[in-house]
Image (cartoon, helix red, strand yellow):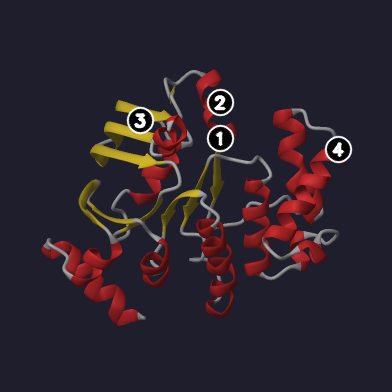
Amino acid sequence: MANSVIDQSTLISLEKVERWYGAFHALKAIDLSVRKGEKIVLCGPSGSGKSTLIRCINALETIQDGSITVEGQLLDGSSKAVDAIRREVGMVFQSFNLFPHMTVLQNCALAPMRVRGTSRADAEKLARKYLERVRILDQAEKYPAQLSGGQQQRVAIARALCMEPKVMLFDEPTSALDPEMVKEVLDTMISLARDGMTMICVTHEMGFARQVADRVIFMASGEIIEEAEPEIFFKSPKHERTKTFLGEILAHH
């Protein structure tokens, strides 16, 4: 029975998290816990704090108050804690951030070699496994500039997976893509979700949220305004701000 208890355990916990940029209050007393295997979609208007929130989880942004714990490791500001958390947390950004002078395979093999001390042969084997996972192994010897935006983003996902993270953070991974490339990236994310990956996704793709999310969280002005299962969130949002946001999003799609 012990295992089933662990499966329900909290993987990420944010308590009363505060983030300021000068006088701008970006995150206000954020409380959030994410269980292992849970898929969470963060949505909300521009400037609502969504990207800041996930960037705090892997210490790309520092918090001024409150606490963040990832798999029992408190993010206490020490480089040891930051390193420990970044080993467990994969991140995919809007821009693909691939090294242009390296092949796809080299891009993916780099972190395991550098961070985990994996041998080149093992790192490349791992890279091939995850490039196949995102259905782009045939592009392994190409350079990023030779790929479409959608292909580059799938490489970026494979690269994050090569660290075999416990959780994947996605910061608007399709917003820089041409419309016809969005689906291939979302399909990759859907397939990861179905495999049980813990995921927090900042996205405006509401179809994805309906299909994949266990919870949809709506943020505005640095606060979590509403959170619910997709069914409830889309059919009967409680707050006026959520209703307005959904109305605008659905009008555009």
Cα distance in 3D space between marks 4 and 1:
21 Å
What secondary structure is found at the residue carrying circle 1?
A: helix
Residue occupied by mark 2: 84
Residue that numbered label 3 is attached to: 63
Residue 6 sits above or below residue 191 on the image: above
Where does label 1 land, which residue?
Answer: 88
Secondary structure beneath disc 4? helix
Residue beneath disc 4: 120
- The earlier-in-sequence mark between 4 and 2 is 2
Left or right? Give the position of 26 relative to 101. left
Looking at the rendered structure, the kind of residue marked 1 is Glu
Residue 104 at x, y = what percent? 78, 55
Is the residue marked by circle 4 packed among few (<14), some (14-19), or many (20+) residues within 10 Å?
some
Callout 3 environment at 10 Å: few (<14), some (14 to 19), or many (20+)?
many
Indicate which disc, 1 or 3, sits on the residue closer to the N terminus: 3
Task: Between residue 8 and residue 202, name the one nearer to us.
Answer: 8
